Amino acid sequence: MNNSLTLPSVTPKFRIGSVDILRGLVMIIMALDHTRDFLHYNIDPTNLQTTTPVLFFTRWITHFCAPVFVFLSGTSAFLSATKKTKKQLSSFLLKRGIWLIVIELTVFNLFLTFDITFGFLAIEVLSVIGFSMIILAAAIYLPLRTIFFIGLIIVCGHNLLDAFDCVKPTETPLWWGFLHQQSFFPYDHNRLFAILYPLLPWPGVMMLGYCLGSLYKKEVDAKRRQNILLSTGILITLFFIILRFTNIYGDPSEWHRQKTFVFTILSFLNTTKYPASLLFLSMTLGPAIILLSLFDRSKGKWTKIVAVYGRVPFFYFLVHFLIIHIICMILFFANGHTLSEANTGFLHFKSPKDGLPLGIVYLIWIAVVVAMYPLCKRYDRLKSSHKKWWLSYL
């Protein structure tokens, strides 16, 4: 199951509009991936032998979600540091990191599978964000330049570990799967524990996002910040194009010429997400930082709407996922299946024989996003008007 990540943002007493807009935009896109996962036919959208350009890009555009959320969670942590002491921030990141791990292993896994016996248990994006926050809780005591270089080394250097990955994911040691290789561990008679999101390189991504937060200090001129963001985003994007073209380093999967020019482009863009390669992160974070620069100047009505989703990401993530799986369950019964057939693998109520055309999937995605808007807006008002400590963890 491909799940893009979201997280509860560290909520300072003031908001950075461009950060909320970008986060809200990728949250809207994230819902498309989950809708496709649950409701479309069982076709791998990145398999160039069976996919179509439209299906490929339906999946590809959602690759931006996890990197942007992890990156911006670091940025939000830095912004929170302007209103907290180091000790307060470190304690908050530690506790919220633990909280995210607990929520994923309980609530989210239940929403994912609808299996009350938890026959399938997975480490996914929330746990990775949680562990990254725990690491950042310690790292914030280091000088900012040191945090930057540690983050850069992790992001740029972790693909050196590809050579140590096991040929078969089921033969991977648990510690190595947790660190660097997507892995599956059968246990206790037909139960399965899966590490879908290895930890690396996500702590490095969060550290770099934390460092970028320094551009939002009050003393930094807005025009200067916008220019730095724009030039940085362009350089990272060009870095991706050049390094990807060489096929030398940065991704375990090389690109190759295909039967048509379009499919050659798809091969070029088909980088590795599990674990997120250097090229995967460059391909997504470069354009995202460009957008961050552009959104820093945007004040249109649409930005206010999109920002609502970006201010309540954790709430949105859990609720929209539950809604989509309920729709999947309704379609399961509408197709004539019975409750005894509900256990169709690790996803209950999803039959491999069923599926909706991609156009219908898009319509349902739009409907889910629209339905989530009043819920997110109301919850945002609740968080803004109440200063309960527990609301900062939601």
Image (cartoon, grey):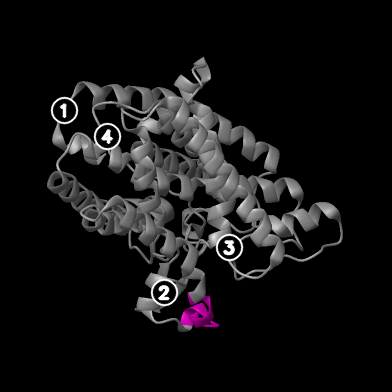
Q: CA distance from mark 3 to mark 4?
A: 32 Å
From the image, tell me which residue sits under label 2: 177
The disc at residue 11 is 4
Dot 4: within a 10 Å radius of its alpha carbon, few (fewer than 14), some, or many (20 or more) residues?
Answer: some
The image quadrant of residue 268 is bottom right
Q: CA distance from mark 3 to mark 1?
A: 41 Å
The image quadrant of residue 242 is bottom right
Dot 2: within a 10 Å radius of its alpha carbon, few (fewer than 14), some, or many (20 or more) residues?
Answer: many
In the image, residue 169 lies in the stretch drawn in magenta: yes
Q: CA distance from mark 2 to mark 3?
A: 16 Å
Sequence-first disc among 3 and 4: 4
Start-end of magenta stretch: 161-170
The disc at residue 387 is 1
Q: Residue at x 57, y 57 (%)?
A: 280
From the image, tell me which residue sits under label 3: 272
Q: Amino acid at mark 1?
A: Lys
Q: In the rendered structure, are the residues bearing label 3 and label 1 in contact, judged by CB atoms less than 8 Å apart?
A: no
Q: Amino acid at mark 2?
A: Gly
